[in-house]
Image: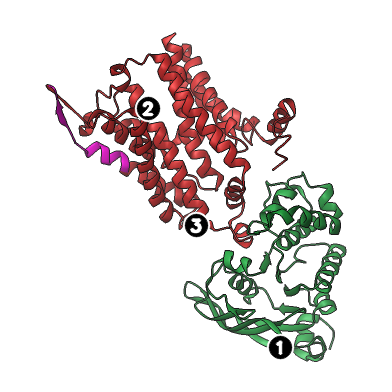
């Protein structure tokens, strides 16, 4: 049973990570910085619960606010670069964050042990869950509560004026300006909200793994972050969830019996999926079918 | 009465000045047309007026208010809407979502549905395709959508950047019929064109821009009498 709860936890946290990239991708910005915000959330929340003795929820929110604030700062210079150059710039930022934690030591004595982040050795003993007697099931439930909150928030945002603005910026910046949309505000707030969401994901991640180190937050994780929404499709947050289940549940876990051949098949299946469904696993057509089936949004109109 | 007055505008891309001190004025309730060859600075001027590009110097006065260097959202808010060159609809939004985007700055959200309805009345084709992605429309339909999207801001002055570009002659006639119609309903129009023949049929006043400078300013009659313009833009035999 614990294996499945563990898998649920991974899928949940990666969904949050994917959603953090989703909102930035809506504005047409390809970001490799999400692993950096995720790392900031992980380390700050870990330090608050371990060193300051906070409860996880306030620690998580503060960590997410810090990540969101940093993301806001990254958003401004990101305005000046586009496309491939933005990829390079955000990759550099993500690596800078990783290397910061690689060099960062801040340990205090707790009883007869030293706790806190210790550079390359990482940050061990983030034991909020076991210390408070949470079972794996409780943790999974906690994670999925936040997944649900974030998905619902983004779902609502997508259907509101704000969502239309972000999409308009993503489709054509010049046209968006010509109808009076403030490009700076749209792009920077997408970055800030994305950073906040990544911060929540990181905070949860640090606590269920109990041990984090800089190497967890490299380019591979950042690539996964944008792969989920791109593979899932930018029509809806559901696509990101489905893509995480596909990659983490099916490709990573389901194909384990293939041994080392798995990695090869892994890449091939992603390429295949993108070719069969170029607009993502969940595109507008699937969404319309879903809407008709469940009659969602009959009252809300077709906004 | 000039509703838009542009005085000595200089706009540069890096060190290259695309507009080298442009001055002109657009009369209220009229159709003013700016003619000029490729690269003369027509689109640069349109983008400078609409706040997408910032001028190095000069003044842009709309109804007496200074708009030079103000961001696009302020300009749209003052009642100046741009129909951009190459239409630039939002391709992966439906026709109706494009129209709603055009009303983005409107404070009176309650009146937006009736404005959408009147757009559909003017362009029944858009109503037929309201749920369709804008990117799947034909060029002419996209141009109508781009015009409609600009109208959703209820502009007092409509800037149109080469609305006839890349469209079939019959569609071009349609577009110009609409331009005249909008003008008859009271919208002031500032039009950029390369199609001088079509422009002659609708515009009340002409400017000619070459290499970032206004080189001609006059009525349609004066334009038709000008030998140089005749040869270069109207293509008539001398």
- Report the side of A54 relative to A255 (left or right): left
Q: Position of residue A128 (x, y in %)?
A: 30, 22
Indicate the secondary structure of the residue bearing disc 2: helix
Residue for point 70% across, 49% down: B97
Indicate the secondary structure of the residue bearing disc 3: helix
Residue for point 55% across, 38% down: A154
Q: CA distance from mark 1 to mark 3?
A: 38 Å
Chain under callout 1: B
Q: Which residue is labeled 3 in the image?
A: A184
- Report the side of B62 relative to A122 (left or right): right
Closer to the chain start, of discs 2 and 3, is: 3
Residue extending furthest top?
Answer: A1
Quadrant location, the C terminus of chain A: top right
Q: Quadrant of residue B224?
A: bottom right
Indicate the secondary structure of the residue bearing disc 1: strand
Q: Position of residue B34 (x, y in %)?
A: 71, 78
Q: Same chain, marks 1 and 3?
A: no
Q: Same chain, marks 2 and 3?
A: yes
Residue B217 marker: 1
Q: Nearer the viewer, residue A165 or A84?
A: A165
Vertical arrangement, residue A226 with respect to residue A27, above or below: above
Residue A205 marker: 2
Chain under callout 3: A
Q: Colour of chain B?
A: green
Q: CA distance from mark 2 to mark 3?
A: 31 Å
Bounds of the magenta span?
A: A97-111
Q: Nearer the viewer, mark 1 or mark 2?
A: 2
Contact, mark 2 vs mark 3 (Cβ under 8 Å): no
Quadrant location, the N terminus of chain A: top left
Give the total of numbered labels.
Answer: 3
Q: Position of residue B54 (x, y in %)?
A: 52, 72
Q: Residues within 10 Å of mark 2 (few under 14, many from 20)?
A: many
């Amino acid at each position: 049973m614990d294996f499945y709860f563990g898998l649920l936890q991974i899928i949940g946290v990666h969904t949050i990570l994917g959603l953090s990239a989703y909102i930035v991708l809506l504005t047409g910005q390809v970001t490799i910085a999400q692993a950096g915000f995720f790392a900031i959330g992980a380390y700050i929340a870990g330090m608050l619960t371990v060193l300051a003795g906070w409860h996880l929820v306030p620690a998580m929110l503060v960590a997410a606010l810090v990540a969101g604030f940093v993301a806001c700062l990254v958003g401004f210079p990101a305005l000046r670069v586009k496309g491939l150059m933005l990829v390079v710039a955000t990759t550099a930022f993500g690596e800078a964050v990783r290397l910061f934690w690689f060099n960062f030591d801040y340990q205090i004595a707790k009883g007869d042990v030293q706790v806190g982040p210790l550079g390359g050795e990482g940050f061990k003993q983030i034991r909020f869950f076991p210390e408070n007697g949470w079972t794996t099931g409780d943790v999974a439930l906690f994670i999925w509560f936040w997944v649900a909150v974030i998905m619902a928030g983004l779902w609502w945002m997508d259907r509101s004026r704000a969502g239309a603005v972000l999409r308009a910026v993503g489709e054509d910046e010049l046209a968006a300006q010509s109808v009076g949309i403030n490009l700076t505000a749209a792009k920077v707030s997408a970055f800030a909200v994305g950073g906040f969401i990544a911060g929540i994901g990181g905070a949860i991640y640090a606590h269920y793994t109990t041990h984090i180190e800089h190497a967890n937050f490299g380019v591979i994780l950042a690539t996964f972050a944008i792969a989920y929404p791109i593979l899932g499709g930018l029509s809806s947050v559901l696509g990101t969830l489905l893509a995480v289940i596909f990659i983490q549940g099916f490709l990573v876990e389901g194909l384990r019996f293939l041994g080392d051949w798995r990695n090869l098949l892994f890449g091939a299946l992603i390429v295949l999926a993108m070719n069969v469904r170029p607009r993502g696993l969940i595109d507008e057509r699937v969404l319309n079918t879903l809407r008709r089936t469940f009659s969602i949004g009959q009252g809300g109109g077709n906004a | 009465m000039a509703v838009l007055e542009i005085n000595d505008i200089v706009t540069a891309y890096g060190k290259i000045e695309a507009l080298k001190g442009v001055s002109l004025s657009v009369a209220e309730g009229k159709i003013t047309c700016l003619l000029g060859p490729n690269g003369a600075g027509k689109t640069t001027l349109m983008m400078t007026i609409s706040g997408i590009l910032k001028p190095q110097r000069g003044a842009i006065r709309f109804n007496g208010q200074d708009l030079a260097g103000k961001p696009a959202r302020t300009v749209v808010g003052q009642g100046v809407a741009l129909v951009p060159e190459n239409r630039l609809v939002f391709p992966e939004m439906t026709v109706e979502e494009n129209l709603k985007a055009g009303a983005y700055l409107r404070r009176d959200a309650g009146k937006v549905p009736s404005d959408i309805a009147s757009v559909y009345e003017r362009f029944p084709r858009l109503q037929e395709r309201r749920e369709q992605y804008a990117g799947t429309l034909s060029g002419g339909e996209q141009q109508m959508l781009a015009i409609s999207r600009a109208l959703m801001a209820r502009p007092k002055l409509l800037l149109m950047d080469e609305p006839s570009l890349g469209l079939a002659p019959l569609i071009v006639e349609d577009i110009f019929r609409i331009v005249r119609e909008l003008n008859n309903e009271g919208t002031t129009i500032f039009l950029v064109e390369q199609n001088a023949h079509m422009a002659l049929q609708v515009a009340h006043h002409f400017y000619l821009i070459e290499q970032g400078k206004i080189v001609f300013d006059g009525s349609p009659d004066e334009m038709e009498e000008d030998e140089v313009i005749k040869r270069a833009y109207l293509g008539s035999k001398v």
